[in-house]
Image: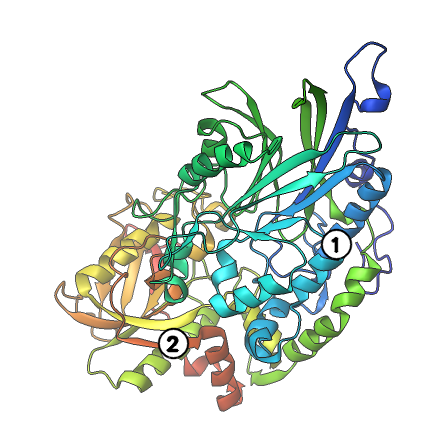
Amino acid sequence: MTNPSGTTRRTVLSAAAAAAAAPFVAPAVAEAHQPGAPKTWDLTLLGTSDTHGNVYNWDYYKDAEYDDSAHNDIGLAKVATLVNRIRAERRGKATLVLDAGDTIQGTPLATYYAKQEPITSTHEKHPMARAMNVIEYDAVTLGNHEFNYGLPLLDLWIRQLGFPALAANAVNLKTGRPAYAPYVIKKVDLGKGAPTLRVGILGLTNPGVAIWDRANVEGKLRFDDLVATAARYVPEMRRRGADVVLISAHGGDSGTSSYGPELPNENPSALIAQQVPGIDAILFGHAHNEVPQRFVTNTATGAQVLLSEPSKWGQRLTRMDFTLSRERNRWTITAKQAATLNTNTVEADPAVLAAVRAQHAKTVAYVNQVVATSTETLSAAESRYKDTAILDYINKVQTDTVTAALGTALPVLSIAAPFSRTAVFPAGEVRIKDVAGLYIYDNTLEAVVLTGAEVRAYLEYSAKYFVTLAPGAPVDPATISEPSVPDYNYDTISGVDYDIDISRPVGQRITRLVHPGTGTPVGDAEQFVVAVNNYRRSGGGNFPGIVKTQVYNAQQEIRQLLIDWAQAKGAIDPADFFTPNWKLVREGVPVF
């Protein structure tokens, strides 16, 4: 692992990391063919996904070099070194580099050039365009987070790239045509004396954009089914001369969705391989998993389709290797395999670091600005299973903002989720990076009106986050939640008092729901204004009752509201906002 200057901090790699650094063994290539055997050539595809605004190996929230328990490294500067090494090893042979999306959102660096100094105002080149242009990608697929900052910023970023941005299933509602390039067919030189190979690359983005960024795309774009879109374009690419067809898809391989049936499947990559003939390999992303190599049998042809997912943030680089032969003017893939390479085995590429150095430095300076002084240390470590002051800080700011805007006679409730297990407001100076570490998403604040019955249903749905633990059974905070439910899909609500009985079945866990102070049960027909982020209000997580017309939507970013509130107060004091109002119980007995 290296710091931004490229100097080595860890000089000893684990045996596993050292093994990952060893040269990848590719399939047999042309030079090794036996006398009389058909001549073969080889093609290598390198792939990233879900880089999420990471260029430097840097944690902006900790203002330190990135590290985790597995000693992963992050960032395109590390990716670039692996790419350059492989290109050098394969000099004179064909190597393509693709990305499967979620590129321009996810770090304070990316946020800074979307919000503080947006490229749409300054026309400065986006840091992710700078880094990817240095690496010389061949194509990028648009991920759902590409749409977070609106279509004008996305369109400008695409124009700044030196290669195509693909999204075949994003359709312009006005024209009925693809809003972005659906695919590209590249003429590839396999080496001296080799016939030209035509490689088709199809990009597919995630249908969830229609929910998650409804405010940015509604009435402008629709997002078609990924399987159906592939079935349309793969034959067209073949007709237009593609000898090899690769798909870069921003959708996982599980075949499941985090939303309901109103949209096409969120994670259909394996289904695409299974159902659409003519595909040779799929680079996929979105789920942030590491899938070095997976083969899926196409049901129509029996062909084995190769799939790989390279984790997240630039921690891994997928390498796919194909052996090809040519007979009667037709190319055939005779062997293929994939692996993921660990970026913690190499130094950062100086050219990529240099290209983004000034923007990185400006971001570091920004996130280190002091916004307030905290009277004590506030931690999010227990926010998943205990009511904590730091999560109540979010709810206080949201409640105050909506109340001030509406002056409503209805009670105002607020919803917040424990996005981070590591966020801390230290005692003393609190900086922008501390607030950004608590609220890591670029959500905006909205509000809707819910009935008491809808509030209860919402809480019941949220409570499925917890495993069922009988009274007296041991409780381990590390395993108290269902692995299938991410932390960001567990919501708490302020403004009402309630108990969650985790010994009871899902759907029957809210055993107490009362008005604060009085203990009066919340009536089913009562009405509340509920402050909520735009992701949840637009259907993210498929929570019941929340997708409805807003009574408040000033397009204010919640992270900035948290910063503004702290700056206005000058102090962060739990006495101003901490009101414990919920707890986990078993048969009425508190779990903690």
Q: Is residue 133 left or right of residue 459?
A: right
Q: Which mark is residue 398?
A: 2
Q: Is residue 277 left or right of residue 85?
A: left
Q: Residues within 10 Å of mark 2 (few under 14, many from 20)?
A: many
Using the rendered image of the protein, determine whether residue 490 is visible from the camera's viewpoint: no
Q: Position of residue 262 (x, y in %)?
A: 29, 48
Which is more N-terminal, label 1 or label 2?
A: 1
Residue at disc 1, secondary structure? helix
Identify the image quadrant of residue 197.
top right
> What residue type is disc 1 on?
Ile
Identify the image quadrant of residue 3.
bottom right
Q: Nearer the viewer, residue 588 or 277?
A: 277
Q: Nearer the viewer, residue 522 or 587?
A: 522
Q: Residues within 10 Å of mark 1 (few under 14, many from 20)?
A: many
Q: Nearer the viewer, residue 387 or 143?
A: 143
Q: Nearer the viewer, residue 153 or 430?
A: 153
Identify the image quadrant of residue 452.
bottom left
Using the rendered image of the protein, determine whether residue 324 is visible from the camera's viewpoint: yes
Q: Is residue 564 left or right of residue 345?
A: left
Residue at disc 2, secondary structure? helix
Indicate the quadrant containing the N terminus: top left, top right, bottom left or bottom right.
bottom right
Outermost residue on the left side: it is: 525
Q: Nearer the viewer, mark 2 or mark 1?
A: 1
| Residue at x 42% of width, y 45% of height | 266
Residue on which disc 1 sits: 135
